[in-house]
Amino acid sequence: MSASLQDTHAVAAELRGASTILLLTHESPDGDGLGSMLGLSLALRAVGKTVVCVVPQGCPDKYDFLPGAGDIDSEVPDEAFDVAVALDCDGEERLGEALSAFRAAGRTVSVDHHQSEARFGDVNWCDGSQAAAGLMVSALVPALDADLTPDIATCLYCAIATDTGFFRFQNTSPKALAVAAELVSGGADPSEIARQASDQMPVAKARLLGRTLSSIETRRDGRIVIAALTVDDFSATGALPQHTDGIIDDLKRIAGAEVIVLLREQVPSEWRVSLRSLDTDVAAVCRKHGGGGHRLAAGCELHGTAEDVTEAIVGDVAAALNR
Ligand SMILES: [Mn+2]
């Protein structure tokens, strides 16, 4: 049996043995985290488990269409569950406010596909070769003896589609496409999921996108593109932090850009820095500043003026570009 299959069965065995299960994902949850969580919750409920899904900040509006999204709790529960599962979390601190509830469970499980170590559970299935956590949950569904329903297929298709940039990023593997095809056969609607999770945006986000595009600076003959959003940009547009989701991917469309740096000021002088690259290892740059992520998509948090933070990151990015 392959290592991955062994891990699938170890996680499935842990879930079968539980009667109450808490499902969690990372802070500022994305389509992969939410789709994986909701798809797994529907499969577990179908085989008789009591399941609670918690997102401390609540489900971002754009993912309201996912089946089961209305059942997500924003309150972190007091009771201890038999098993808690962290999905798509590259480190237990990524659970944010839900970390205490995770730790309080009888057994803990981590299912993750980031490159950095996510082995913080009693049972861990961490596989950096998987394009999305949704692919891993797609394997868990049959391992739990649950049927693939259209609702589960919708959640898992959304997970895989969003983490592969709707099948355009480098992680778009034959396996990602094959599993997505199975999910479409199982009732997922690719056109509707793309419309909900990617194409449409609230007007506040459109205004924020406008400000992002006007803030662009370039370095190294346009190979590095930098954009910054300040606290003022959010208050002037009425945009929420969740509205930055996907904006960095729009910046990747700039011709000649090899590394994109997006700075978001969370509170004055506290910056969330997101990096995307075509080839340069930006996870290494972010690890140097206490962050992490994937080789081509990573992030960290820094304190200071926009200028200081930009210089600190751009210096390291420029050095990595030359390597
Ligand atoms: Mn993911």
Image (spheres, grey):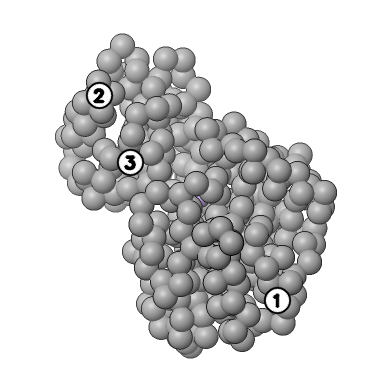
Label 3's element? helix
Look at the picture and state if 40 lies above or below 194: below
Q: Residue at x 77, y 62 (%)?
A: 148
Mark 3 neighbour class, 10 Å CA radius: few under 14, some 14 to 19, many 20 or more: many
Q: Residue at x 73, y 78 (%)?
A: 47
Q: Which residue is mark 1?
A: 45
User: What amino acid is found at the position of numbered circle 2 in the picture?
Assistant: Arg
Cβ of mark 3 under 8 Å from ligand 1: the answer is no
Is residue 307 in sight in this rendering? no
Q: Which residue is mark 2?
A: 323
Residue 322 lies, in percent from the top left, at 25, 20
Residue placed most toward the observer, 206 or 166: 166
Real-space CA distance between mark 2 and mark 3, rounded to the nearest whole angstrom: 14 Å
Mark 2 neighbour class, 10 Å CA radius: few under 14, some 14 to 19, many 20 or more: few
Query: Quarter-wise, where is residue 144 in the image?
Result: bottom right
Cβ of mark 1 under 8 Å from ligand 1: the answer is no
Furthest residue in direction front, as rendered: 1
